[in-house]
C-alpha cells in the first residue's frame, strides 16, 4: 500500500511540474502589428515631370500643383523615379470629372523603361503594366487620339474632352527623380493629318503620324517638340467637327489680291493654348514653352491649306493670312526657323508660295522662313492607288514624308536658306 501511494505521489508531482511547461508551449506566439507603408504620390509640379512644350495648362495658369491638362493629340510627358522594391507598382492618376458621356475618353500609349502599352482609354487611375525591378524608372505617356469635339473650351471654362494629369502614385519608399529635358523645342502646327487622323492603319493615332516621327527624330538632336493640330482646321477654317469650336489659325477677311484685310484675334488660335484664356505668349509677347520668358521655339512647322481648299476659303484671304501670320510669328519667335509646308496633296500651292514670297519681299533680312514641298509625285501617289493612303496618309506615307521633312529641316539648320524664289 505504501508502495502504491508513493508511486501515486511521485506521478502527481511529475504531472504538476510538467503542466505549466506544456501550457506555455501551447500558447500562440506573440505577434507585432504593423501598419502598411503608404504609397508615394509624385505631384505634377515635381521636377520628376517634364511636359511637352507649348501644349499644357494647369490649375494655376500654365502651372500649379494639382494638374496639367491638354487637348492636343501628340502631347506627351515623362516622369522619373526610383524604387527599392523588387516588385514595384505605379499608377497614373487622371482627373476625368469633365467626361460627360457625350464623347469617348481620349486614348493614351505609354512606355515604361522601353516597354510599350498602346490604346489605353483615359480613366481615373491607370495601373502601369510591365513595370519591374528595383532601381530607376522612366514613364513616357503619349496622348494618341481623341474625338474631334468638345476640346477647345470657352473664356473661364475648360474644354471637356481633355487629358488632365493629376500625378503618379508609386509604391512606398519610392523617390521622385529629376526628368531630363531637351534644351530646345519645335512647334508642329497643322490639321487632322498632323494630328494623325486615320494614320494608324485605319485608326487615328498620332504615334503613326509624320509629326510624331519628325518630333522623335529631332529629340535625338536635343529638341523637345509640341504638336498643336486640329482636325478640320486651316489658315481660315475653324477646327473640330463642323461647325467647329476651335478657331482658325490666323483669321483675316476683306483682303484684295492677297494683301490687306482685317485680322480677327478672337477668331484666331495662333497665340492661344485653348479657349479658357490661356495664352501661348509670355509677358513680352513671345511664344513660350511653359509661360516664362526666354522659352521661344527654335523651329516652327505649319501644315495648313487642305481644309481651306476643301471648304472653299477665299483664296485672297488665305494668301493674306499666310503673309500676316508669318510676320506675327516672326515677332513672337524672332530667331525661329519657320517651315511652311505645301499640303501633301498640293492644295493651295499658289496662295502658299505667294504668301511666303510676300513676307520675304517685305522682310528681306528674314532668312529663316522656308517652304517644304514634297512635290507633285507625292500628291499623285495619295490620289492614285492608295499605297500611301489618301487625303489622310497611312503609316507608310507618314513615315516616308517624315524622313523627307527631317532632311529639309536638317539642311536648313546646317546652312541658313536663301529667301524663297
Image (cartoon, rainbow, N blue to C red):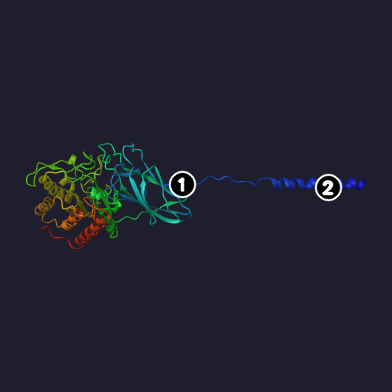
Could you tell me which secondary element the residue under label 1 belongs to?
loop
Residue 384, horizontal then vertical, whole percent: 19, 54
Q: Which mark is residue 39?
A: 1
Q: Are marks 2 and 1 in contact (CB under 8 Å)?
A: no
Position of 419 compared to 36: left or right?
left
The image shows residue 390 at horizontal and vertical percentages of 22, 51
Residue at (26%, 39%) from the top-left corner?
153
Residue 113: which quarter of the image?
bottom left
Residue 406 visible at all:
yes
Looking at the rendering, in which quadrant would you find the C terminus?
Answer: bottom left
Q: Nearer the viewer, residue 1 or 80?
A: 1
- Numbered label tally: 2
16 lies left or right of 245: right
Q: Which residue was labeled with disc 2?
A: 11
Can residue 334 be seen?
A: no
Q: Residue at x 38, y 46 (%)?
A: 167
Please name the residue shown 91% across and 48% down the image. 3
Q: Nearer the viewer, mark 2 or mark 1?
A: 2
The residue carrying pointer 1 sits among few (fewer than 14), some (14 to 19) or many (20 or more) residues within 10 Å by Cα, namely some
Q: Residues within 10 Å of mark 2 (few under 14, many from 20)?
A: few
Q: Residue at x 41, y 55 (%)?
A: 137
Above-or-below relation of 299 to 122? below
Given residues 257 and 19, the one toward you in this image is 257
Q: Residue 329, image x and y in percent? A: 18, 49
Residue 115 figure quarter: bottom left
Element carrying mark 2: helix
Amino acid at each position: 500500500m505504501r508502495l502504491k501511494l508513493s508511486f501515486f505521489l511521485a506521478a502527481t508531482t511529475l504531472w504538476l511540474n510538467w503542466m505549466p511547461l506544456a501550457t506555455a508551449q501551447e500558447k500562440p506566439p506573440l505577434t507585432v502589428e504593423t501598419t502598411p507603408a503608404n504609397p508615394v504620390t509624385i505631384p505634377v509640379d515635381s521636377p520628376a515631370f517634364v511636359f511637352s512644350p507649348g501644349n499644357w495648362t494647369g490649375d494655376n495658369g500654365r502651372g500649379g500643383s494639382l494638374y496639367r491638362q491638354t487637348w492636343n493629340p501628340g502631347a506627351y510627358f515623362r516622369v522619373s523615379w526610383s524604387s527599392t522594391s523588387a516588385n514595384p507598382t505605379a499608377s497614373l492618376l487622371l482627373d476625368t470629372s469633365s467626361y460627360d458621356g457625350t464623347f469617348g475618353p481620349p486614348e493614351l500609349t505609354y512606355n515604361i523603361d522601353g516597354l510599350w502599352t498602346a490604346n489605353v482609354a483615359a480613366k481615373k487611375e491607370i495601373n502601369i503594366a510591365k513595370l519591374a525591378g528595383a532601381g530607376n524608372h522612366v514613364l513616357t505617356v503619349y496622348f494618341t487620339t481623341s474625338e474631334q469635339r468638345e476640346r477647345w473650351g470657352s473664356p473661364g471654362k475648360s474644354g471637356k474632352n481633355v487629358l488632365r494629369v493629376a500625378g503618379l502614385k508609386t509604391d512606398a519608399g519610392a523617390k521622385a527623380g529629376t526628368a531630363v529635358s531637351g534644351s530646345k523645342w519645335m512647334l508642329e502646327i497643322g490639321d487632322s493629318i498632323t494630328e494623325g487622323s486615320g494614320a494608324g492603319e485605319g485608326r487615328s493615332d498620332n504615334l503613326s503620324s509624320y509629326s510624331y516621327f519628325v518630333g522623335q527624330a529631332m529629340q535625338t538632336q536635343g529638341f523637345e517638340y509640341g504638336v498643336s493640330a486640329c482636325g478640320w482646321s486651316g489658315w481660315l477654317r475653324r477646327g473640330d467637327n463642323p461647325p467647329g469650336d476651335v478657331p482658325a489659325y490666323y483669321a483675316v477677311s476683306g483682303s484684295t489680291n492677297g494683301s490687306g484685310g482685317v485680322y480677327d484675334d478672337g477668331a484666331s488660335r495662333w497665340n492661344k493654348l485653348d479657349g479658357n484664356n490661356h495664352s501661348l505668349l509670355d509677358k513680352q509677347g513671345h511664344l513660350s514653352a511653359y509661360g516664362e520668358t526666354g522659352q521661344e521655339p527654335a523651329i516652327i512647322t505649319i501644315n495648313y491649306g487642305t481644309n481651306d481648299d476643301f471648304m472653299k476659303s477665299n483664296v485672297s484671304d488665305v494668301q493674306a493670312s499666310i503673309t500676316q501670320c508669318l510676320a506675327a510669328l516672326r515677332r513672337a519667335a524672332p530667331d525661329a526657323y519657320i517651315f511652311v509646308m505645301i499640303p501633301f496633296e498640293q492644295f493651295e500651292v499658289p496662295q502658299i508660295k505667294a504668301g511666303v514670297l510676300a513676307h520675304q519681299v517685305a522682310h528681306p533680312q528674314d532668312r529663316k522662313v522656308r517652304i517644304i514641298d514634297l512635290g507633285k509625285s507625292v500628291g499623285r501617289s495619295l490620289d492614285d492607288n492608295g499605297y500611301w493612303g489618301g487625303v489622310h496618309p497611312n503609316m507608310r506615307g507618314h513615315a516616308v514624308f517624315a524622313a523627307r521633312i527631317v532632311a529639309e529641316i536638317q539642311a536648313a539648320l546646317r546652312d541658313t536658306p536663301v529667301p524663297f524664289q
